[in-house]
Image (cartoon, rainbow, N blue to C red):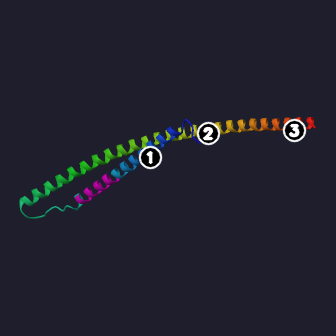
Amino acid sequence: MKTRFSSLVNVKKNTMQQSESAFQKANAAFLNAEDALKTSTEQLQELASPTDGQISNFLAHRTLLDVQRVLITHNQEWVAFSQTEMQKAKEQLKFDTIEYEKFKYLEFEEQKKLIKEAKIKEAKDLDEIALMTYANKNYKKAAL
């Protein structure tokens, strides 16, 4: 049954679905960032220090350690950023879901009201038909 809230319910449902999709993407990005951070820390732990050799080997190892630490810092920032984005998407999804539920409830109440009005109208019509039938029967009996 179409009410004045039907189109709003559809719009809010579409908005909610878009928010849900954005939340899923943000969650996936967060998980990817966590995986990248985990991988980079594991790679840092796997770097073994040279115990002998030329000084250039020691310098190269130190440079690798510095690069890996910079990568870890970058991945930590990426995790923090993606976590805030996921939180924002979650809040937006919550807001959109509440809005959708509000309008869905309003539509349901409007439908109940329309059904009640239709039942009252139907009852009045049936009473009128019964009255006309009763009056018609009495008129026919009086004519005989």
Q: Is residue 35 magenta?
A: yes
Q: Amino acid at mark 3?
A: Lys
Q: Which mark is residue 144?
A: none
Of the two numbered discs 3 and 2 in the rendering, the one whose residue sits closer to the viewer: 3
Secondary structure mostly taken by the magenta-highlighted segment of the chain:
helix
Q: Mark 2 packing: few (<14 Cα in 10 Å), some, or many (20+)?
A: some
Horizontal and vertical percent position of residue 20: 43, 47
Q: Earlier in the sequence, mark 3 or mark 2?
A: 2
Tag 3 residue: 137
Judged left or right of residue 60, residue 135 is right
Pointers 1 and 3 in contact (CB under 8 A)?
A: no
Q: Which sits in the foreground, 10 or 79?
A: 10
Which disc number belongs to residue 17?
A: 1
Disc on res. 111: 2
Range covered by the magenta-colored residues: 31-43
N-term mark: 1 or 2: 1
Q: Amino acid at mark 2?
A: Gln
94 within the magenta span: no
**What amino acid type is highlighted by mark number 1?**
Gln
How many numbered discs, if any? 3
Q: Nearer the viewer, residue 87 or 126?
A: 126
N-term-proximal mark, 1 vs 3 = 1
Instruction: Tell us which disc is closer to us: 1 or 3.
Output: 3
**Viewer-closest of 18 and 119:** 119
Q: Position of residue 66 (x, y in %)?
A: 17, 52
Q: Is residue 5 above or below residue 27?
A: above
